[in-house]
Structure formats: C-alpha cells, structure tokens
Image (cartoon, rainbow, N blue to C red):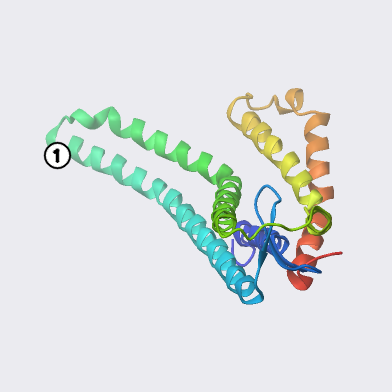
Amino acid sequence: MGEFDVIRVGQGAANGRLARCIRESEAGWLFYSPTGTAYHIFAEEAERLARQGEAAIERSTRNAILSRKLYRAMIPLAFAILLTDAFYLRLEGEFAGLETGPFIFTCMVIGSIVLAMFHPLLAMIYRGTGFILWQAKIAHNLRRQRRGGVSSAIEARHMRFNLFRILSMAALVPLVFRLAYYFFVVPVGHYREYFGWADLALAGVFFWAAIPAFLIDHTHRRRKWLD
C-alpha cells in the first residue's frame, strides 16, 4: 500500500484523541479519564504522559502492521500444505492427508481474505481499546492520589469530543458488515437486488463526516485544543 497505509492514516485520529485527553485550562493541566472525569496534573506530568500516550499508540500501530503480515503469510503457508500433501501422494501412492490438505488450504485462503477485509477495522478497534485501557490506568492512579476536585464548570468546559469522528465510525462499522454480507452471502449477479439506499446513506455519512473529523483531529494535534 506504500505510504498510504490505512493503519498509519488512522494513527492521526488516535493522536488527536490523546490531545483531547491531556490539556491546559485556567485551573492548570488536566487529564481526562475515559468517562470524562478531569484530574489535576503538573506540567511535567502532562509532557511525560503525552510521550507515554504517543508511545502506546505507536506500539499498537506496529502490532497491527505485524498482524497484517501474519495473515498475508497464511496464503503461501496454505500452498505449502497443499504441495506437501501432493508430494506425499506421489511418493507413497496414498496419503491420509489427501482429503485434509485441500480443506485446510481452502480454509486458510478464505480466512486470509476475511482478515484482509476486516483488518483495518480490527486495527482501529485494537488501537482504540488499547488507548482506553491506558487512559483508564492513568486515571485510576490519579484518583488514588486524590488528584480530582476539578470544578464541574471547568471540567465540562474543557471536555471535548470529535463528534464527526464518532459519526463517521458509527456509519463505517455497519457499512463494512453489510459489504461483507454482500460478498460472502449474496449470489454473484444479484447484488443490485440487495444493495439499496441504506448502503448509499451509510457511505455518504461516512465520507461527509470523515473530512471535518480529520480537520478537527489535525487542529487538536497542532493546537492541543479547539476552544
């Protein structure tokens, strides 16, 4: 995929979320938990936590790329199983694995195709889950240190969400599953009977919301916040 890697592109959204999690306010630096509770932190802690968050996001991105390499390796491995099966058949005249070899080959190829289709979505879920766990761990430590006590007015004023990002993901997930349904279930040549306005609406919402979502994440990464 070259430089345009969907996993790397999604990393910008994760960094934008990190920028919304750690921010400066009139009450000082704040760290927000996944539930939206703000905790007081020091300026040096904010810098350290930002580096930790970026490292966690980069680590999850590398793991997602590694998992992509693993499922790509399933197809040559499947061919190796099939060739080994054929070799023993030719050598021995008969081989107990004759029936299992093609079956394993077919399952691995189909499994690789399924993972290839869903891998970008799974990578986003994996990275988002990892970030939430990290965020919850930091918030738990701050709560144990009694770092809360941020006034509700300040907490609410400086808490932000990228609503366009949420909307685009809410449209993307059902769209991916509907397209997978068409690919694996609907008979070839009958797509027009099942593909309808709902799919066009989901695709339209996703692309319409993705552009401002990207711009908002970019602004947050650059300015730390958009007040």
Q: Nearer the viewer, residue 191 or 212?
A: 212
Q: In the rendered view, tell whether residue 92 sits above or below residue 141.
A: above
Q: Nearer the viewer, residue 131 or 27?
A: 27
Instruction: Write the residue at 58% across / 29% down.
Output: 184
Rendering coords of residue 196 (x, y %): 80, 28
Q: Nearer the viewer, residue 190 or 211?
A: 211
Q: Nearer the viewer, residue 123 or 5?
A: 123
Q: In the rendered view, tell whether residue 142 sits above or below residue 102.
A: below
Total numbered circles: 1
- Tell which residue pokes out farthest to the left in this image: 92
Task: Judge left or right: residue 39 versus residue 158.
Answer: left
Rendering coords of residue 49 (x, y %): 59, 68
Task: Judge left or right: residue 215 versus residue 172.
Answer: right
Tell me the quarter of the image containing the C terminus.
bottom right
Rendering coords of residue 107 (x, y %): 41, 34
- Tell which residue pokes out farthest to the bottom in this image: 44
Q: Quadrant of residue 17?
A: bottom right
Tell me the quarter of the image containing the N terminus.
bottom right
Instruction: Write the residue at 67% across / 35% down.
Output: 179
Q: In the rendered view, tell whether residue 188 sits above or below residue 112.
A: above
Instruction: Write the residue at 81% across / 69% down.
Output: 26
Q: Give amino acid for label 1.
A: Leu
Q: Secondary structure at mark 1?
A: helix
- Tell which residue pokes out farthest to the right in this image: 227
Rendering coords of residue 99 (x, y %): 28, 27
Instruction: Say few, some or many: other residues with alpha carbon within 10 Å of mark 1 (under 14 / 14 to 19 / 20 or more).
Output: few
Instruction: Write the residue at 36% across / 43% down.
Output: 78
Q: In the rendered view, tell whether residue 10 sits above or below residue 89.
A: below
Q: Which residue is mark 1?
A: 91
